[in-house]
Amino acid sequence: MVAVTSFIAMLATTLVDLAKLYFDPWSTWLWVIRGVLLFFSDKIKTRTWILYSKKADFQQHVTIENRRAHDEIVDLWTDVLSERNLSSLGDEKWLIFEQVFKSALHCSKQSIARHCLDQLEKQFKSTSRRVTTLNAMYHESIDDFKSADDIYSNLLDENETDAIVQKRQISLLKEKNQIREAISQLNSYLELYQADQEAWSELCDLYLSEHDYAKAAFCAEELLLINPHNHLHHERYASIRYSQGDDYEKARTYYFSALKVNPANIRALYGIVLTSTNLAMKNSSRSNENNQVYIEQIQWAREQIIQKYREAIPDLLPVVELALQSLAL
């Protein structure tokens, strides 16, 4: 677009020169046309560089905020940043290479990841533990687990308290489906880093994959202690208690607490329907005034679910209503 407008502007300049010889009245208009075209040509150039700057700022923002925007980052690299000289960004360009590398691995774009890793290795050689860890991650992505494990083991021999490398090694065990070994190492890791929410969450998932609900519930309780304001922790603990099937009342309580923290939590509303239904069925044979409370809560939760789907995804409303009918007492 810029090249076309520049060519037209040059053509207009030539026409102006010819008009001076033959058509003096037209020369003024041609000068005006030339000026307009040059103006828009400069605007297009300026807009292009502003767009590049904004996209670089977006890349920096994603890096700082630790956002999960892997597809957008890879698209940004492919469409814009890979064609630009990043030297103007100074040392921040190495952070961009690292972020693009990790996003490329998430999107299975090994060629982009390899390019970024090569740039980082040229700059920092083999003396950087950070780049060495990235190299091991690349080996993981191409299923070269032995090379990755060897790199992680060497790094831990140098510094056994490196939390990032320990997590990567546990992730490698999980990738190789060695769940028992991953659980053992994760427990050892948590003896050193007891406030690591990601580690407790991962350990909870591993116990759930082994159907060890009691230990998974313990991990969920630790998450609640560390961050009681996260509605997902309340919901997860409630779901585990519901799956155990021995304490629907506690599960129901934590579904309500999840809903208190985040009123838009649909899963918590479904949980209230399920737990209250089970409690009402459990006490149906005896005269219990709590049954009326359970029935009222079921009706309230059903109405909330239908209302939220009607506002957000009305096309799914018939399916939701059918599902709720199947849960009716």
Image: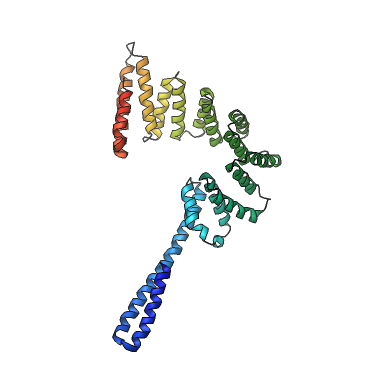
Picture quadrant where residue 48 is located: bottom left
Is 64 drawn above or below residue 217 in the view shown?
Answer: below
Task: Please indicate, yes or no, whether residue 26 appears anywhere in the rendered image.
Answer: yes
Residue at the image position 66 percent from the left and 50 percent from the top: 128
Residue at the image position 52 percent from the left and 58 percent from the top: 82
The image position of residue 61, as x and y in percent, is 49, 52
Is 104 drawn above or below residue 161 in the view shown?
Answer: below
Residue at the image position 31 percent from the left and 80 percent from the top: 29
Q: Is residue 13 left or right of residue 177?
A: left
Nearer to me, 288 or 144:
144
Q: Is residue 30 left or right of residue 214?
A: left
The image position of residue 70, as x and y in percent, is 49, 47
Nearer to me, 282 or 293:
282
Is 18 drawn above or below residue 192 in the view shown?
Answer: below
Q: Which of the image's four quarters has the C terminus?
A: top left
Q: Is residue 151 left or right of residue 86?
A: right
The image position of residue 270, as x and y in percent, is 37, 28
Picture quadrant where residue 242 is located: top left
**Residue at the extreme top of the image, as rendered:** 286
Picture quadrant where residue 263 is located: top left
Q: Is residue 30 left or right of residue 171?
A: left
Residue at the image position 62 percent from the left and 30 percent from the top: 181
Task: Please indicate, yes or no, whether residue 304 appears anywhere in the rendered image.
Answer: no
The image position of residue 248, as x and y in percent, is 42, 20
**Residue at the extreme bottom of the image, as rendered:** 21
